[in-house]
Image: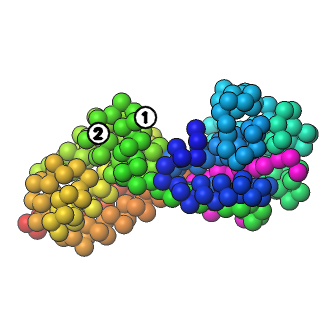
Amino acid sequence: MAWLEIRGQQLAVTMLQADLAKQRVAAAYLFAGPEGVGKRLAALELARALICEGGSGESCGQCDHCRRMQRGVHPDLHLLVPQGSAKNIRIDDVRRMLERVHLRPFMARYQVVILDGAECLTDEAGNLLLKSLEEPPAHAAFVLISAQPSACLPTIVSRCKVVRFGRLSAQDLAALLTSQQTCQPQTAQVVSRLAQGSLAKAAAQLQRWDASRAMLAQFASEQPVAWLEWPIPTDREAVSQWLDGAIAWLRDVAVAGAGGDTLLTDPQTAPQLQRQAAMLDHERCVETALRLVALSHSLDEQMISARLIGTLFREQWLSLVERETRNV
């Protein structure tokens, strides 16, 4: 992995490369941005650059340190992720990591800690980590990663240099899907427009592509309420795909009504969408889409159970489609 291979995050990459070139690496970073946009890849590349023998700001990929990093066995790299059914990072995990980090590095110039899921730190774990961020060891670099930086302890955020990562463009996502997945270009184009700039969401869409395609077909059919007879899924990923598909469909109805067929998620559905656009009130479509986006945010932040989100989604859909089709 090299910096150039991190797609769609030029601003973040440039900032990190500048810190390395000027030898002004922060004691602690917070990589903030949506899931699946390259935050962990960038954190690993920063770790490689710091641990590499060359010390040039780029990992050489050839030295003993780089080879150990590639195998995931370097003793000076520490990765913490949420554990257990509660999906949190506990104080014992942080204590063990800090005990090691406060010692001198085994092999490299730096010890690097990558903490993926900073919002999942328990209060006790966060307060313990904060003490080390306030007085960090000179040979240590901390990289915290979060898709929900607002849920992190404010005192931790204030001790970090924040590097923001944006959503990937549909073009970048389609290119990544085509190169990394067994995926046809046409499928990659549709999935990339459903995934809201997240490679993780795109990969999940592909894993359930038959179900996602069936849902999209139902939305665009002459009976767009027939799917309401399907059982509500209990897992968050499936409900998230329902919401993503519905939001994309509502957007496409508005686009088709304005004659922008080339901008559709799937241009092949243009005839069906144009018929639906003639039946539906565009303002109500926009209002419903905004409500679904709010539900999607609640789902991402785990504020409400997946089943309840699915139930609320069905109610919103039924309210829109049945009312409008009755008025035709």
In the rendered view, does 157 fall on the left or right side of 187?
right
Residue shown at 9%/59% (left/top)?
275
Inspect this view and state whether residue 19 appears.
Answer: yes
55 or 145, which lies in front?
55
State which region is magenta: 138-154
222 or 265, which lies in front?
265
- Element assignment for label 2: helix
Q: Which of disc 2 and disc 1 is earlier in sequence?
A: 1
**Percent position of residue 1, x then y:** 58, 38
Inspect this view and state whether residue 95 appears.
Answer: no
Residue shown at 45%/45% (left/top)?
199
Q: Distance between the residues labelled 1 and 2?
A: 12 Å
Tag shown at residue 180? 1
Judging by the rendered image, the residue that carries numbered circle 2 is: 185
- Bin the neighbour count of mark 1 within 10 Å (Cα to Cα): few under 14, some 14-19, many 20 and up: few
Quadrant in the picture for the C terminus: bottom left
Q: Identity of the amino acid at label 2?
A: Pro
116 or 150, which lies in front?
116
142 in magenta: yes
**Percent position of residue 316, x then y:** 31, 60
Residue shown at 24%/46% (left/top)?
216
- Compared to residue 12, the image places residue 98 above or below, namely above
In the rendered view, does 305 fall on the left or right side of 272?
right
- Bin the neighbour count of mark 2 within 10 Å (Cα to Cα): few under 14, some 14-19, many 20 and up: some
Can you tell which quarter of the image residue 70 is in? Answer: top right
- Compared to residue 67, the image places residue 169 above or below, namely below
Residue with the most extreme right position: 103
Q: Identity of the amino acid at label 1?
A: Gln
- Element assignment for label 1: helix
**Percent position of residue 176, x then y:** 42, 41
**Percent position of residue 172, x then y:** 41, 49
Can you tell which quarter of the image residue 13 is in? Answer: bottom right
